[in-house]
Amino acid sequence: MQADFLQIQHLDITLSGNEVIKDMSFKVRRNTLTTFLGPSGSGKTTVLRAIAGLNQHVNGKILLDNQEIQDQAANQRNIGMVFQSYALFPNMTIFDNVAYGLRVQKQAPTEIREAVAAMLKTVGLTDKRDAYPDQLSGGQKQRVAIARAMVLKPKLLLLDEPLSALDAKIRVSLREQIREYQQKLGITMLFVTHDQGEAMAISDDIIVMNEGCVQQQGSPMAIYAQPDNVFMAEFIGNHNLLTGQQLQRLGITTAGNHPLAVAEHYVIRPELISQIQVPHSVALAGKITSLTMLGDRVRYQFLTDSGMVLKVEELNFMRPLSTNVPLTLFVNPLLIHQVGTTYAE
Amino acid sequence: MYHKTSTYWARGIMTALFLYLVTPIVVTLIYSFSTSWVKTILPSGFTLKWYSQLITNADFTSSLLRSLGLGLLTTVIAQICFLPVVFYANVYDARVKSHLRFVTVLPFTIPGIILVTGLIQLYADLPIPKLLILVLAISLLSLPLTYQALDNAFIGQDFRAMFEQALVLGDSPLKAFIKVILPNIRAGILIAMLLTFTSAFGEYVLTNILLGGNFETLKIYMYRLMQSNGQASSVLTTIYFIFLALVSLILIVIMRHYAKHDQSSQKGTHN
């Protein structure tokens, strides 16, 4: 797997006089699905558009398969893109939409027919080939948009929040399909989303962005378990963010295998605090102050005897839990992660 | 009781208004077919003579051709000038739209006579044909109609994404515009063209002041005819009315067709 199939080097993007992307660098491996994750306005779509060649004021280098492409026009880059609004052409049938790029490439009509038929079969829309976009549901439209991009066998496929306009059930089904197409066809995909669950579910790699900067890049597990900084700890998943001093008040003296630093911040995920005792765990005495039943899980606020409030989330073991009743929980110091003193620059 | 009386009043006023508006049209129509209609309740007879006389009249044919030429030329110039601007404003820079809205109101605020005086003073010493000045001036006057119809055509679809999608699929900007943008705004273009054409076809003030007798359009010919031949003038008015009615009908059909299309599109977008 080529480790640097797409390389972004010192990218600066200015829009309407504002520098929205600042000295950004990252790499994407070949044949992987990498997700851009970040809050609204963090610059995810701007970077995606720069890679596609749709931004005009870009400084820095963009290398795709070892070729510099930052100066090429959008129609010269061999990069596919799926837009948030599907961007299907309403005046063309589904067949013509998918065949659009192949016709631009002036491929033979028989080759176009075969390629489009195969792609429509892959996305399960063979019976819709003569329909128009306005006759399809949102999920079907998005599959057409993906088919139209994939049929050209692009070096890289960019997907700009492709599921945001769909309802929850279809989102889950379609994201699994996108992952399936990516693995089946061996396409390198860069997927933009602001939904953490979506990013965790389908990505090989996640790049988390905030205010025009990369905060962290890594596998979903690494991003979740080892956040690099306070922003990452707060942005990804639920968390308890405590200083070394606060941990000491709980009777905890180490984090990971290291002694605590008083001024540093540490993160404890709520699901790592449990009623079940494991070796080397530290006991926390206290009581539940508020309780939320989530069906398969229970979520509660735990007030320790030392006066600290912790968020806890456990599997529902079908045991009755009550508020304001003395209870002992356990936390393993090996799973407490240090995240630094401030937000990353 | 009160309700019944007010309904009668409302109906009475509506009928009076209807008669006030329709009677001149009906009378003009009847008059155009009458052999003679002087000091009698009904015409003395009916004939197609005035129609055949008008149609075979060289002045009528040439004025009709001039009006058609003026209408077509203005329509083409207006589209060539304004369509790229409206496209740019809608696809690339929405901030331009606020400036455009201001500019498009200007033709309403400048009376024709002031515009003509200004144009003559500005271009009198330059070797520019007055006809060209006229065509450009009428094109500019049609800006409010053209802009509004074209701008409305860009509502409801993400044209920026569609255009950029075509570029990413490998097409050139010009081909993407022709293949993806134009077919999807054709209703707006057609409506803008019809409105521009009708306003240019019936233009009187600018043409009369700027070119006068040297360039007799259908409207100028109509006014000249009114002074000399009542029946022929009513024939021309009838033909002109039918022409405008046809244009209106086409506009209504287009708008209904696309309104239905939009409704079915909205139904289709449900998951």
Image: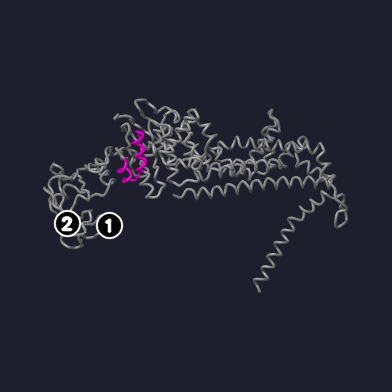
Q: Which residue is mark 2?
A: A304
Which SS type dominates the magenta stretch?
helix
Of marks 2 and 1, which one's residue comes earlier in the chain? 1
Q: Is residue A20 magenta?
A: no
The spot of residue A220 in percent (x, y) is: 27, 41
In this rendering, position of residue B27 left or right of residue A203: right
Q: Position of residue A238 (x, y in %)?
A: 26, 49
- Label 2 SS: strand
Q: What's the residue at 76%, 45% (across, down)?
A: B239
* Amino acid at pointer 1: Gly
Counting the numbered discs, the total is 2
Residue B126: percent from left, percent from top: 68, 29
Q: Amino acid at mark 2?
A: Thr
Q: In the rendered structure, the residue with mark 1 lies on which chain?
A: A
The image quadrant that residue B41 belongs to is bottom right
Q: Specify the label residue B144 is tagged with.
A: none
Closer to us: B146 or B153: B153
What span is colored magenta in the figure? A175-202
Q: Which residue is mark 1?
A: A295
Residue nearest the viewer, comparing B53 with A301: B53
Residue extending furthest toward the left: A280
The residue depicted at 19 percent of the width and 51 percent of the height is: A273
Does the magenta-highlighted stretch encompass residue A198?
yes
Q: Residue at x 72, y 59 (%)?
A: B17
> Which circle, 2 or 1, is nearer the viewer?
1
Q: Which chain letter goes with mark 2?
A: A
